[in-house]
Image: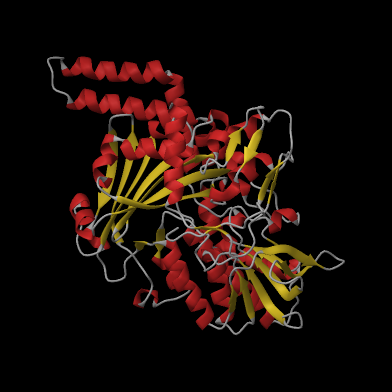
Amino acid sequence: MTEEKFDAIVIGAGMAGNAAAYTMASRGLKVLQLERGEYPGSKNVQGAIMYSNMLEKIIPDFRDDAPLERHLIEQRFWMMDDTSHIGMQYRSDDFNESRHNRYTVIRAQFDKWFSRKVREAGATVLCETTVTELARDSDGKVIGVLTDRTGDMILADVVVLAEGVNGLLGTRAGLRETPKPQNVALAVKEMHFLPEEVIDQRFGLKANEGCVIEAAGTISRSMAGLAFLYTNKESISIGIGCLVSDFAATMESPYELLESFKNHPSIRTLIAGSEVKEYAAHLIPEGGYRAIPQLFGNGWVVVGDAAQLNNAVHREGSNLAMTSGRLAGEAIFLVRKGGRPMTKENLALYKSMLDKSFVIKDLRKYKDMPALLHTNSRNFFTTYPQLLSQAAQNFMRVDSTPKLDKERATTAAFIKARSRWGLVGDAVRLAFAWR
Amino acid sequence: MTIAVTNLRVEDKLYQNRYVVDSGRPHIKVRPHKWPSANLFALTSVCPAKCYELNDNGQVEITADGCMECGTCRILCEASGEIEWNYPRGGYGVLFKFG
């Protein structure tokens, strides 16, 4: 392998790495992809929702053989207190279209499929290989990698860092900083298996229709966090994630949070009788636009979670990963086609392509949202959910209290908890962060 | 009592997972210390696999066999030098069946 030189080395076989490797290999580049897991996907964790539009731009006919679980026709957003949830939900038969918009997937299976496509496109995929170091020349240009498989250096014109949120290589080489505790969430997740028809009945689904629940509130114990429940064909992915900085400050235990969420009266019946077959943990980039590091340099680009490309507000990540991987691959292809070297100057093309895409535009839109939600987490994740629950219960519960008194009590509770100025301030800050 | 119940529970969870443990080559090490920092101490409850535990002398120890390689401890304690964090050798460590 030492005498061989590749056009590009891709580190990691997740969404971003596979997108990059496929894009380059299918355009005729000589690509080596390195993955430390036993098989592609064995180290990867996601909820997981896969977004068709972004995969279609890479593999248009993916629906022919990709392992898809259910297409989503319903989304529920819940605000929870300890005994209740108040929610908004949207369900539409329009989502029963022939080219479905979103699917749940099981990453270990999906990533194996994606990797097969990468190999079919002509890339060399080497699993069970941990890259230990980036190789650089005397000018600091990245020229290849060192792995734990052999002591030898593997050379390439460019290295695509698709090493994930906790990528060691780029941070140790000083290409970007290690994420700050306030810019990453720790999520834990379990896979609960149930017969397909039981899931259909509990969520009112048929014929591979799927439903998603995303929930915030007292379940995160005042930390900035979100819980989720996704229906797969014969299983339910259920999990909760909160900021690492909040976990460290509160010393809450993630699996106890997950147990509480599973035992919440609104959730318990949905997963009753299921068999748990896996427990996973993973970090999620939450810093948004302001946490995006330098994305390219001499002989390297960084894509996906490693580049913090995650839209926390819309809970989108895999599509940003796929798109950044694809654009990096296209940029590298164009630089090479022009006969130009993989310098920082030339690889800036990747950044300008990413800037023009939804990836950076969306992240820029919500650039102030992380700071708002992360610094006021008690208000947004405990106080407001409790107030809304009380308000709803005041409205629903029928007793002999006159309605006007009930409404006054609700208003008084909001003002007591947050004050008039506090309420106005929260509304204004939220509106500004959203616009 | 609460702690005993919690212990049991996370071990039951981890029991579902598939691991190939690289015996004798732990990928995370805790630097010897007299007293743990707040972040290092926090790992005894924040680590989702409960790999970190306080010993009788008040020091934090790690058994990384159940580690899911999430990196939370690295984010909290690598910069201060309290822990040394590497990925396991290729093919070793947690191997998710579903992910």
From what the image shows, is residue B75 above or below residue A47? above
Number of numbered discs present? 0
Q: Look at the image and tell me whether residue A92 can be seen.
A: yes
From what the image shows, is residue A262 above or below residue A204? above
Left or right position of A287 against B9: right
Spot occupied by residue A430 in the image (x, y as percentages of width and height): 46, 36
Quarter residue A175 falls in: bottom right
Q: Residue furthest right?
A: A138
What residue lies at 64% left-to-right and 46% top-to-bottom?
A: A179
Image quadrant holding the N terminus of chain A, namely: bottom right
What residue lies at 34% left-to-right and 36% top-to-bottom?
A: A79
Asked whether A430 or A135 is in front, the reply is A135
Left or right position of A360 against A212: right
From what the image shows, is residue A393 above or below residue A340? above
What sort of colour scheme is used for the picture?
A: secondary structure
Spot occupied by residue B70 in the image (x, y as percentages of width and height): 56, 49
What residue lies at 34% left-to-right and 18% top-to-bottom?
A: A413
Spot occupied by residue A276 in the image (x, y as percentages of width and height): 35, 51
What residue lies at 49% left-to-right and 38% top-to-bottom?
A: A432
Asked whether A161 or A95 is in front, the reply is A161
Left or right position of A45 against A206: right
From what the image shows, is residue A182 above or below residue A300? above
Q: Look at the image and tell me whether residue A431 can be seen.
A: no
Left or right position of A372 against A172: left
Spot occupied by residue A38 in the image (x, y as percentages of width and height): 54, 67
